[in-house]
Amino acid sequence: MRHRVDHRKLGRTSKHRLALMRNMVASLLEHGRITTTLPKAKEARRYAEKVITLGKKALAATDPAQALHYRRQALSALHSTAAVKQLIDKVAPVYKERKGGYTRVLKAGFRLGDNGAIAIFELV
């Protein structure tokens, strides 16, 4: 039984998995669309939704100190200043009125070498 099993391990250590998620979400924010395996895309979707919500909070904050706090939280989650700048300047304003569901995972067939499921992970 899979009771209380929270996430996919993706065959990596926890540090490697976290670095993978950070890099994938940063690439998604910079390019708008990435191609990856289906399990990675499904797992990165959870991380991306939280980061985009942080960007929205930074945009909506009336107090400059609060906005800086959310910006720093996003930077802590992504480790990429370019991605955080893209998030707050371009991505967050688009989703200002949206309650959630900022990303989409589309199945894109199977990889030739090992028949792994491929997906397109994009911003809605």
Image (tube, helix red, strand yellow):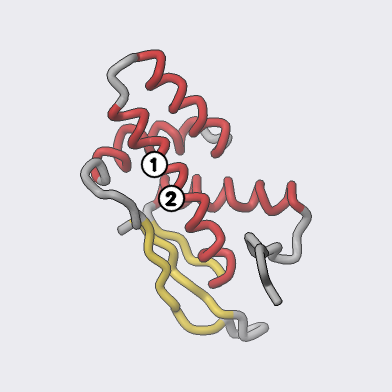
Q: Residue at x 67, y 64 (%)?
A: 5
Neighbours of disc 1 within 10 Å: few (<14), some (14-19), many (20+) = many
In this rendering, would 61 be left or right of 13? left
Q: Are marks 2 and 1 in contact (CB under 8 Å)?
A: yes
Position of 21 relative to 57 (above/below): below
Q: 115 above or below 23?
A: below
Which image quadrant: the N terminus? bottom right
Placement of 10 over or under 77, stated as above or below: below
In x, y percent, where is residue 118? 52, 76
Q: Residue furthest right?
A: 13
Kind of residue at disc 2: Glu
Identified at 46% across, 42% down, the residue is 51
Which quadrant is home to the C terminus? bottom left
Q: Between residue 84 and residue 65, name the one nearer to us.
A: 65
Residue farthest left in this picture:
97
Residue at point 42%, 36% (across, down):
54
Q: CA distance from mark 2 to mark 1?
A: 6 Å
Q: Residue under circle 2?
A: 49
Could you tell me how many numbered marks the image carries?
2
Look at mark 1 in the image and give the residue it sits on.
53
Q: Position of residue 3 (x, y in %)?
A: 67, 69
What residue type is disc 1 on? Thr
Residue 20 placed where, x, y %?
63, 52
Dot label at residue 45: none
Q: Secondary structure at mark 1?
A: helix
Name which quarter of the figure residue 55 lies in.
Answer: top left
For label 2, count other residues whose C-alpha is less than 10 Å away and answer few (under 14), some (14-19) or many (20+). some
Q: Position of residue 109 (x, y in %)?
A: 48, 83
**Left or right: where 26 falls relative to 93:** right
